[in-house]
Image: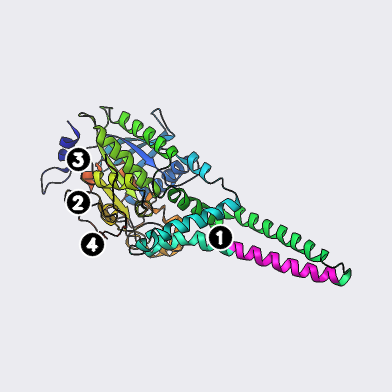
């Protein structure tokens, strides 16, 4: 059965319930711009999966991975009377992220100036404000926070210099010596304060977010060579999985910045041609920030991949965001807002995780102002789950296309072309 026939079988005839059609699945998870070891995602799946299973009345059991390749784990599930075996693998690029975060304090401030210059002078920042204010505020946050830290350091330097000069002059008037010594002491304390701020970035996230935005903006939206090479490796791993006749579905999950990485990896795979026999290939994007890259002038590769992937009838693509996630471009069709949608577009299906409805008032109150935690809520349990359940999607009996068959896109979907730059790379 080829992938198109399998998709038709997955969907079933109009008006019929989608069949329970997954016994074995392989999931490839692409993280966002994250320097953390991938075990973080295993532990998140273990704890949150157990919570969701208890809330929803099914069973999930984790065990060591049973496949070769990247870091991962195995999940045995009992859902709706069906037994499903799923192997998860994390497509790691955290080493690339760590390398990109090695800039010194001075280097980070240079990144700030250059990144702000790129987004402002290209008109990208202004166009992004046409969409959602949340991610734009998130993008401005590290700029404002780092500038605030610098101002405090300069005030400390000036205050220390003035106080030292005054006290020294009272005790031992020596002309300009006191001014020089005071300036040196003030500068030293200012540097120490900036170092202290950087050490506390696990609470402030200013340096982390600045490096994140700077990484994409450095080449005006084009992928850096090291990321292109890693994406080729990702494509090889996914292609090899598609050759396994024992699998029913290969599901690629791209979270945050991992969503646009996944778009390009899958577009490359599809252009090369998928195996005629084998599992269904599906794509789930979560909390995507695609416009932050696709709106940049040199993002011609990404825009071409968005356009191409959106027209592939046999590769289901579901995009899940939520207005409550201030770090994502919630309910923005990444293809349409990037200005590359054509009449042949079929994907993605843009739906909302609707945090205010799928989380109880008590739970929402607890999480509402924890912005970075909410950006990971897509991978977590909901105490009032709707049709979006990450654990049933990734480890349950239904293929992605079948689970959302007949689902209408969110009525609040934003599909107005907003990008100034719409050229695509020839493929």
Front position in the image: 62 or 287? 287
The residue identified by callout 1 is: 146
Image point (35%, 62%), residue name: 127
The mark nearer the N terminus, 2 or 3, is: 3
| Front residue of 291 and 15 | 291
Q: In terms of sequence position, does the residue under pointer 2 or pointer 1 come before the other?
A: 1
Q: Which residue is rendered at x = 41% and y = 29% of the image?
A: 69
Q: Which residue carries the number 3 mark?
A: 314
C-alpha separation, residue under disc 3 versus residue under disc 1: 46 Å
How does the figure colour the protein chain or chains? rainbow
Q: Looking at the image, which is closer to me, 78 or 155?
A: 155
Give the crowd class for mark 2: few <14, some 14-19, many >=20 residues within 10 Å. few
The magenta region covers: 149-169
Q: In 3D space, how far apart are the residues under numbered discs 2 and 3 (Cα atoms)?
A: 17 Å
Is residue 249 in view from this perspective? no
Q: Is residue 403 left or right of residue 137?
A: left
- Up the image or down, 426 lies above or below 180; here it is above
Q: Measuring 24% from the left and 41% from the top, which residue is drawn there?
A: 399
Q: CA distance from mark 2 to mark 1?
A: 41 Å
Q: Nearer the viewer, mark 4 or mark 2?
A: 2
Residue labelled with disc 4? 411
Looking at marks 3 and 4 on the same chain, the residue that comes earlier in the sequence is marked by 3
Rendered location of residue 354, percent (x, y): 32, 60
Closer to the observer: label 4 or label 1?
A: 1
- Distance of label 4 from label 2 (alpha carbons): 20 Å
- Where disc 3 sits, the SS reads loop
Find numbered disc 4 in the image and state the secondary structure of the residue it sits on: loop
Indicate the position of residue 264 as horizontal and vertical percent values: 32, 42
Image side of residue 144 versus residue 241, left or right: right
Where disc 2 sits, the SS reads loop
Above or below for 304 versus 141: above
Tell me the number on the disc at residue 342.
2
């Amino acid at each position: 059965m080829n992938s198109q026939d399998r998709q038709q079988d997955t969907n079933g005839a109009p008006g019929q319930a989608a069949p329970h059609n997954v016994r074995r699945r392989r999931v490839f998870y692409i993280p966002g711009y994250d320097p953390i070891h991938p075990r973080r995602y295993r532990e998140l799946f273990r704890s949150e999966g157990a919570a969701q299973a208890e809330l929803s009345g099914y069973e999930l059991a984790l065990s060591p991975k049973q496949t070769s390749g990247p870091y991962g784990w195995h999940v045995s599930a009992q859902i709706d009377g069906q037994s499903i075996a799923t192997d998860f693998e994390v497509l790691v690029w955290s080493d690339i992220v760590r390398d990109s975060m090695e800039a010194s304090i001075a280097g980070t401030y240079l990144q700030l100036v250059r990144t702000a210059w790129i987004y402002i002078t290209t008109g990208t920042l202004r166009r992004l404000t046409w969409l959602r204010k949340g991610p734009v505020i998130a993008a401005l946050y590290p700029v404002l926070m780092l500038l605030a830290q610098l101002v405090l350091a300069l005030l400390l330097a000036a205050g220390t210099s003035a106080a030292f000069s005054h006290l020294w002059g009272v005790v031992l008037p020596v002309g300009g010596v006191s001014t020089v010594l005071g300036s040196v002491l003030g500068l030293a304390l200012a540097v120490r304060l900036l170092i202290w701020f950087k050490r506390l970035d696990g609470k402030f996230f200013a340096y982390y977010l600045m490096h994140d935005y700077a990484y994409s903006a450095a080449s005006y939206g084009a992928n850096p060579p090291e990321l292109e090479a890693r994406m080729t490796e990702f494509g090889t791993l996914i292609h090899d999985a598609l050759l396994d006749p024992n699998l029913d579905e290969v599901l690629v999950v791209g979270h945050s910045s991992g969503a646009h990485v996944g778009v390009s990896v899958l577009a490359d795979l599809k252009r090369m041609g998928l195996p005629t026999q084998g599992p269904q290939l599906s794509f789930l994007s979560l909390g995507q920030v695609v416009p932050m890259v696709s709106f940049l002038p040199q993002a011609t590769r990404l825009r071409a991949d968005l356009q191409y992937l959106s027209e592939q009838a046999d590769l289901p693509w579901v995009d899940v965001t939520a207005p409550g996630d201030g770090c994502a471009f919630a309910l923005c069709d990444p293809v349409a807002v990037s200005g590359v949608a054509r009449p042949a577009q079929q994907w993605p299906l843009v739906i909302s995780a609707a945090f205010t409805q799928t989380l109880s008032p008590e739970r929402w109150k607890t999480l509402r102002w924890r912005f970075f935690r909410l950006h990971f809520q897509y991978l977590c349990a909901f105490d009032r789950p709707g049709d979006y359940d990450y654990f049933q999607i990734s480890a349950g009996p239904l293929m992605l296309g079948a689970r959302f068959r007949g689902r209408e896109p969110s009525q609040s979907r934003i599909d107005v072309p907003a990008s100034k730059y719409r050229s695509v790379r020839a493929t």
